[in-house]
Image: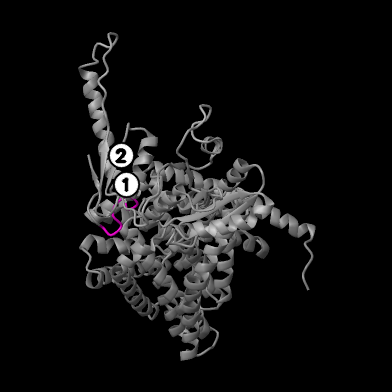
């Protein structure tokens, strides 16, 4: 029977909620201090938790410890839930930043690093478990189970800690950062399978082929579902939410809901919820239509609120005072040395022998994957609850987890100072830097409002050809829309079907809106996370009171997204401009227009950048024909060079890796 939520239980919960800011503010302050000292913020956050916990403040002032550290089971559960949310949000961000294509290119290294790290660390941990004193074993007669548990605990890596370190050091988009993440997820997946087997042994169950197959099958089933049906679910749900709802935070809500859904699924399969959060992040990263604003919002929530609490809670569990005896200190140092040595040596051998990487790069993998963090603490807690570990051995493993987490950023910074990125990686990073401010590189959803005609107009045909050219480079999603009266719905739908046939790539979304306020209905639709709106401007006489048409002028003034206005005549189906003239004056509008020009150029065509420097003559400007003209020429040259570099972006260059399409 469910217990009523009594006033006492409400007070207990409120006290725990009040402690959350106390677990958030000091880590944030220490994180700021660490950043000022040139260190990753995760170092300050972990140290803040240790200082707040029984090791320092709570040990010196027991009253603070009794108030800050959970004293009841309810408080402990609530604080753990908040901490788990931190881990899930950090893994969600990690998944969103994961580049599957880059990992595929680094697959050989990732497999070698993971294989070496697991094998050597597991073997060294098992050997160490055979020599731990009996006084630290809960049951000396079950030393084999204890040794297997130690080996498993040492094999895993703390993906949340590693992800935070990579973010702090700005390594998430580096080749080495993506490889570390791929290897770490493999380590953890294998580690959780091994842990389920060891837990079965601790419960008196025998290791059988069926038990091992059941654990491995759960992971395989989850991954298969996620990257087949799950990927379709995420894509369709995102399309439905963006197309049917006009609530500002609708996409953010969807991402968080699916994060919890995938976390619940992994928990149901006896896996970790953080694995589900990581995978759903990857699935969203594989969709082009996720707005970048949503990713930035999740980053602020995760790194500003939940991450400090997560690391503070981990630090609260450390009690260094309980280890202040020579024997326990010696054992703790040996455990830390074996865990660190096994991971570094294993990953080094795997990276060198299988991945073929150089000395310092191979060392960098070990430096990054050596962090054990809160995942190790979770495993240690499981071992304590199963009767495998004593309280002292539990504290030793927790100290090892925190020590390796604190070592990771320093070691990674040191090893990477000796690693020179390849020219290919530098080029990729530069392209990503340029793409951040690129219009077309960030175009995912395009709205194309049209008027119903008996036949598709030349403007619609050239718009379709332009979008086809853009789609071949950026994989965009097009929505055709028209506004009509109620009696014209059928004709409007038929016209959109006919117009959609002009697009040969992705399926086109078609929308018929009914009403008299054409501009208002189009504007309402444009509010739904579109990155570009394409309008047709007819040729012919126009009123002097409008620039193009009343509707086009209104939409261009009020559109929430950039607008591309197209004027032209009928074009061939295989239209591919061979020579594109790009006129620029250095403005942002000219930059965006040049992006369109680069994208339209045929693979074997050329784009000619032109900027005219006008020599101004004035009696009021003494340097009009001298230094001023020279400065104008220098600025014009810089503007042209910047556009040349922009033309090298994948969204602007030949998608098959052809030559540079720009010349000046």
Q: Quadrant of the C terminus?
A: top left
Q: Of residues 357 and 403, which is closer to you in this image?
A: 357
Task: Please report whichever mark, 2 or 1, sits nearer to the chain's N-terminal start.
Answer: 2
* Residue 634 located left or right of residue 537: left
Tag 1 residue: 598
Colouring scheme applied when the structure was drawn: one colour
What secondary structure prevails in the magenta region? loop
- 292 or 361, which is in the foreground? 292
Mark linked to residue 289: none
The answer to which image quadrant residue 516 occupies is: top right
Where is residue 1, by image quadrant? Answer: bottom right
The magenta stretch spans residue 651: yes
Q: Which residue is tagged 2?
A: 582
Residue 596 position in % (x across, y down)? 36, 45
Give residue 362's position: percent from left, percent from top. Answer: 26, 64
Give the vertical position of 34 relative to 419 (above or below): above
Identity of the residue drawn at 45% across and 38% down: 539
Q: Secondary structure at mark 2?
A: strand
Q: Is residue 54 visible?
A: no
Q: Tell me how many marks there are.
A: 2
**Residues under labels 2 and 1: Cα distance?**
9 Å
Name the one closer to the observer, 568 or 429.
Answer: 568
Task: Examine the rendering and report whether any part of residue 366 can be seen.
Answer: yes
- Magenta stretch: includes residue 504: no
Question: How packed is label 2: few (under 14 Cα within 10 Å), some, or many (20 or more)?
Answer: many
Q: Are marks 2 and 1 in contact (CB under 8 Å)?
A: yes
Instruction: Give residue 251's position: percent from left, percent from top.
Output: 57, 54
> Residue 440: x, y in percent?
40, 48
What element does badge 1 sit on? helix
* Magenta segment: 650-657
Within 10 Å of disc 1 (Cα), the crowding (few <14, some 14-19, many 20+) is many
Quarter residue 152 falls in: bottom left
């Amino acid at each position: 029977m469910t217990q009523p939520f009594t006033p006492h239980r409400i007070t207990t919960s409120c006290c725990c909620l009040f402690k959350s800011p106390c677990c958030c503010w000091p880590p944030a302050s220490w994180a700021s201090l660490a950043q000022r000292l040139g260190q990753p913020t995760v170092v300050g956050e972990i140290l803040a938790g240790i200082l707040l916990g029984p090791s320092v403040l709570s040990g010196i002032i027991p009253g603070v410890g009794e108030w800050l550290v959970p004293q009841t089971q309810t408080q402990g559960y609530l604080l753990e839930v908040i901490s788990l949310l931190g881990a899930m949000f950090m893994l969600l961000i990690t998944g969103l930043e994961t580049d599957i294509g880059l990992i595929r290119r680094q697959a050989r290294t990732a497999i070698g690093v993971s294989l070496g790290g697991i094998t050597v660390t597991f073997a060294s941990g098992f050997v160490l478990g055979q020599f731990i004193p009996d006084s630290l074993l809960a049951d000396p007669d079950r030393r084999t189970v204890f040794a297997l548990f130690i080996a498993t605990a040492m094999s895993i890596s703390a993906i949340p800690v590693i992800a935070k370190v990579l973010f702090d050091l700005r390594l998430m988009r580096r080749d080495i950062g993506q490889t570390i993440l791929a290897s770490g997820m493999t380590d953890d997946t294998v580690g959780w399978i091994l842990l389920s087997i060891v837990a079965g042994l601790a419960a008196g169950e025998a290791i059988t082929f069926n038990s091992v197959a059941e654990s491995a099958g759960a992971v395989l089933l989850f991954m298969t579902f996620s990257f087949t049906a799950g990927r379709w679910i995420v894509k369709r749900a995102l399309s439905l939410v963006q197309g049917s709802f006009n609530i500002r935070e609708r996409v953010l809500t969807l991402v968080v809901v699916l994060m919890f859904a995938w976390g619940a699924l992994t928990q149901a399969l006896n896996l970790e919820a953080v694995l589900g959060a990581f995978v759903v992040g990857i699935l969203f990263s594989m969709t082009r239509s996720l707005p970048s604003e949503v990713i930035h919002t999740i980053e602020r929530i995760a790194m500003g609120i939940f991450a400090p609490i997560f690391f503070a809670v981990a630090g609260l569990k450390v009690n260094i005072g309980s280890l202040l005896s020579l024997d326990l200190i010696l054992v703790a140092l040996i455990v830390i040395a074996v865990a660190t040595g096994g991971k570094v040596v294993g990953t080094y051998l795997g990276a060198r022998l299988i991945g073929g990487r150089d000395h310092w790069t191979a060392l960098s993998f070990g430096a990054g994957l050596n962090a054990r963090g809160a995942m190790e603490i979770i495993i240690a807690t499981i071992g304590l609850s199963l009767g495998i570990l004593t309280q002292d051995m539990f504290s030793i493993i927790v100290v090892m987890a925190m020590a390796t987490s604190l070592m990771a950023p320093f070691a990674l910074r040191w090893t990477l100072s000796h690693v020179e990125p390849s020219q290919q990686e530098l080029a990729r990073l530069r392209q990503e830097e340029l793409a951040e401010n690129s219009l077309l590189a960030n175009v995912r959803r395009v709205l194309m409002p049209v008027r119903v005609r008996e036949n598709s107009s030349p403007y619609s045909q050239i718009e379709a050809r332009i979008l086809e050219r853009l789609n071949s480079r950026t994989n965009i999603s097009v929505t055709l829309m028209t506004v009509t009266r109620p009696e014209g719905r059928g004709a409007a739908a038929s016209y959109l079907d006919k117009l959609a046939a002009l697009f040969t790539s992705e399926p086109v979304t078609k929308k018929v809106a009914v009403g008299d306020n054409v501009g208002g209905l189009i504007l309402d639709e444009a509010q739904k996370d579109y990155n570009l709106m394409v309008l047709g401007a007819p040729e012919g006489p126009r009123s002097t009171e409008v620039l193009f048409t009343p509707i086009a002028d209104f939409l261009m003034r009020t559109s929430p997204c950039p607008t591309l206005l197209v004027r032209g005549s009928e074009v061939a189906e295989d239209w591919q401009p061979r020579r594109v003239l790009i006129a620029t004056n250095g403005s942002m509008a000219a930059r965006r227009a040049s992006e369109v020009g680069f994208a339209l150029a045929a693979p074997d065509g050329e784009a000619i950048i032109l900027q005219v420097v006008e020599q101004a003559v004035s009696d009021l400007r003494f340097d009009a024909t001298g230094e001023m003209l020279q400065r104008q020429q220098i600025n014009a040259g810089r503007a042209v060079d910047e556009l040349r570099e922009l033309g090298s972006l994948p969204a602007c260059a030949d998608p098959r890796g052809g030559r540079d399409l720009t010349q000046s």
